[in-house]
Image (tube, grey):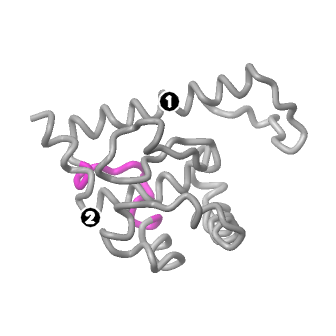
Amino acid sequence: MSVPSSFDAEKAENLEDIEKQFAVAAVMQAQTYWNLLEKVKGSTLRLTRLDDEIYEHFTRDFPEYASPEAVDKISENDMKSSRGKERWRNFMNTYEKTVNDFNFGTLLRTGSKDEYEEKTTIFVPRMQFLAIEIARNKHGLNDWICAQEA
């Protein structure tokens, strides 16, 4: 589900139906991603044509996330603090013209060893999801999902 180009988030009313549609789209994306990880090792998966560029940029702008241990568990508080929001906004806006729906709401597992569940999932913009999941995949942290299905 794409956001119409005429949609202005600053002027949008918070209508319950719109919120439900966004939630349904986020859940569908999470289910699709999980189904993909069950079939393909994350370490061999490309989420975009820009995976390498996104990973390099992510680890350059967020060196604290460069190690496998750092992207294994994500702190929502760190990401959504005032400083975190500013850093992420600057990172994400780089992809406004190159990644479709770069700021679309997406579900992210807080831990790479977790499945999508209420207590282990947070709502983030798509670029945060991509940066963290690309890093997790490059470090092989999602490979267990495919292995458990084998």
From the viewer's perspective, tell me whether residue 64 is left or right of residue 128.
Answer: left
Tell me the distance, in whole angstroms, between the alpha carbons under discs 1 and 2: 25 Å
Q: Which residue is mark 1?
A: 27
Q: Is residue 16 magenta?
A: no
Q: Secondary structure at mark 1?
A: helix
From the viewer's perspective, tell me whether residue 49 is left or right of residue 102.
Answer: left
119 versus 14 height, above or below: below
Q: Among all residues in the image, which is located at the extreme front?
A: 119
64 versus 130 height, above or below: below
**Residue located at (66% from left, 55% from top):** 96
**Residue located at (55% from left, 54% from top):** 127
Give the crowd class for mark 2: few <14, some 14-19, many >=20 residues within 10 Å: some
Between disc 1 and disc 2, whose residue precedes?
Answer: 1
Which one is nearer the viewer's eye here, 23 or 2? 23
In the rendering, which numbered label is found on residue 120? none
**Residue located at (69% from left, 34% from top):** 3
Give the crowd class for mark 1: few <14, some 14-19, many >=20 residues within 10 Å: some
**Percent x, y for residue 119?**
46, 42
Which one is nearer the viewer's eye here, 52 or 88? 88
Q: Which residue is mark 2?
A: 139
Q: Among all residues in the image, which is located at the extreme left?
A: 150
